[in-house]
């Protein structure tokens, strides 16, 4: 059974179907994957090198980003991006209150102050109206998360950013391959990131991530910081980190990238099947896809009025589920204790409600959704 996705409370009772069927995906591409893996292992070049360079070029070509810099994880991509953008201690950054901890965590780790915004009740994306209310004299930027696989409302967010002189960091950890009005995700921010965690729509065999930008200076600095602040051996221009992607992960991603569009089509079909079922029932509301958006459906997520009753039904049917996310970020102890500024906005009624109703079901390109519906 595959491991449950990060950033959620996941429930598996006994031996049952996988939440994300990574074994079936590997079986589908086994010959290509084993050939790519063997080539890397036989080469003796395990960090960086031609595989990583080729992957960066192919990622840029796929999403339309001018520059791509790979790194060790999606979280590391966020941290490096904030360093590139010049975040300083005391700077405030607006982040959604309903998402994985990484965006807010990275802001606070670097000495900044996360300010938590409410979300749209239908799309579950960050609310531009809430963002506008939160902008203050210390605000430097906005982190917009493409939650559950569809893009945040970038046209409205860009208007706010332009009005107040803010940057936008696009967190597309769940949405590489999604589009908004025909434009690919990872191209909406001043700098953008994605994650290659195994359960992502494009995932490797461990942690991995990438940074995307049209700004050549941003790309150069990100690459510098990801290599201990060094362009040449034993000469360090800045304090950086070890943020390099290994060649084996790059080789795996290159194989999977070749199949991504086909998998996204199957994910869309699976989502449509779920949607038709749940829309026919009362008390169930699937995440709404905003006009102009396509989604990678990193998770299939819906709101359930009687979540506890539905969970009992899932348990009887031996269908695993996850709760993405069980509580608002601003209630996490790491943000509550001694960080009053990060919780200055007390008006997040949508997030409070959504956290009590949200639930995700087994989902990927290889999930038999019809079988799950029959069990339910």
Image (spheres, helix red, strand yellow):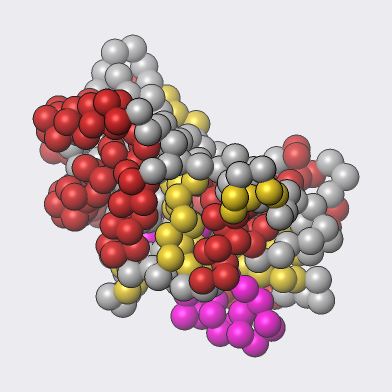
What residue appears at the point 40 percent right and 70 percent down from the top-left corner? 66
Is residue 39 among the parts visible in the rendering? yes
Camera-nearest residue between 345 and 283? 345
Q: Is residue 170 magenta?
A: yes
Outermost residue, bottom side: 163
Camera-nearest residue between 255 and 202? 255
Outermost residue, top side: 14
Give the side of residue 40 with respect to residue 328, left or right: left
Camera-nearest residue between 202 and 375? 202
Is residue 330 among the parts visible in the rendering? no
Q: Quadrant of the C terminus?
A: top left
Count up the numbered dots. 0
Give the side of residue 304 with respect to residue 92, left or right: left
Percent position of residue 298, x then y:
34, 47
The picture quadrant where one finds residue 362 is: top left
Camera-nearest residue between 19 and 356? 19
What residue appears at the point 41 percent right and 51 percent down from the top-left corner? 174
Percent position of residue 181, x then y:
31, 77
Give above or below for 281 relative to 215.
Answer: above
The residue range painted magenta reads: 147-171
Give the side of residue 118 with respect to residue 311, left or right: right
Q: Is residue 34 magenta?
A: no
What residue appears at the point 85 percent right and 53 percent down from the top-left corner? 340
Percent position of residue 332, x then y:
70, 40
Percent position of residue 84, x then y:
64, 62
The picture quadrant where one finds residue 85 is: bottom right
What residue appears at the point 26 percent right and 45 percent down from the top-left corner? 254
Q: Quadrant of the N terminus?
A: top left
């Amino acid at each position: 059974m595959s491991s449950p996705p990060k950033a959620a409370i996941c429930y598996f009772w006994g031996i049952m179907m996988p939440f994300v069927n990574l074994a079936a995906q590997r079986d589908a591409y086994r010959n290509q994957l084993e050939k790519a893996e063997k080539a890397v292992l036989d080469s003796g070049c395990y960090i960086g090198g031609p595989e990583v360079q080729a992957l960066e070029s192919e990622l840029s070509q796929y999403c339309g980003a001018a520059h791509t810099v790979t790194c060790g994880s999606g979280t590391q991509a966020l941290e490096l991006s904030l360093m590139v953008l010049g975040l300083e201690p005391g700077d405030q950054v607006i982040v959604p209150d309903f998402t994985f901890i990484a965006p807010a965590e990275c802001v606070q780790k670097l000495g900044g102050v996360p300010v938590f915004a409410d979300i749209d009740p239908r799309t579950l994306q960050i609310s531009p109206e809430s963002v506008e209310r939160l902008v203050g004299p210390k605000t430097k930027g906005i982190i917009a998360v493409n939650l559950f696989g569809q893009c945040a409302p970038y046209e409205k967010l860009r208007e706010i950013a332009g009005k107040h002189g803010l940057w936008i960091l696009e967190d597309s950890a769940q949405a590489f391959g999604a589009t908004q009005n025909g434009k690919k995700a990872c191209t909406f921010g001043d700098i953008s990131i994605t994650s290659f965690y195994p359960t992502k729509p494009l995932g490797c065999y461990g942690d991995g991530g990438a940074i995307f930008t049209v700004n050549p200076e941003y790309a150069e600095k990100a690459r510098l910081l990801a290599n201990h602040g060094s362009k040449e051996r034993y000469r360090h221009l800045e304090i950086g980190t070890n943020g390099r992607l290994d060649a084996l992960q790059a080789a795996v991603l290159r194989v999977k990238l070749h199949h991504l569009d086909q998998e996204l089509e199957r994910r869309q079909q699976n989502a449509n099947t779920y949607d038709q079922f749940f829309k026919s029932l009362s008390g169930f509301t699937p995440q709404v896809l905003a006009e102009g958006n396509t989604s990678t459906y990193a998770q299939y997520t819906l709101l359930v009025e009687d979540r506890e009753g539905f969970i009992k039904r899932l348990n009887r049917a031996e269908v695993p589920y996850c709760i993405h996310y069980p509580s608002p970020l601003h209630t996490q102890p790491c943000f509550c204790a001694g960080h009053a500024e990060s919780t200055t906005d007390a008006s997040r009624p949508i997030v409070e409600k959504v956290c009590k109703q949200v639930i995700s079901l087994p989902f990927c390109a290889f999930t038999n959704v019809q079988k799950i519906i029959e069990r339910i």
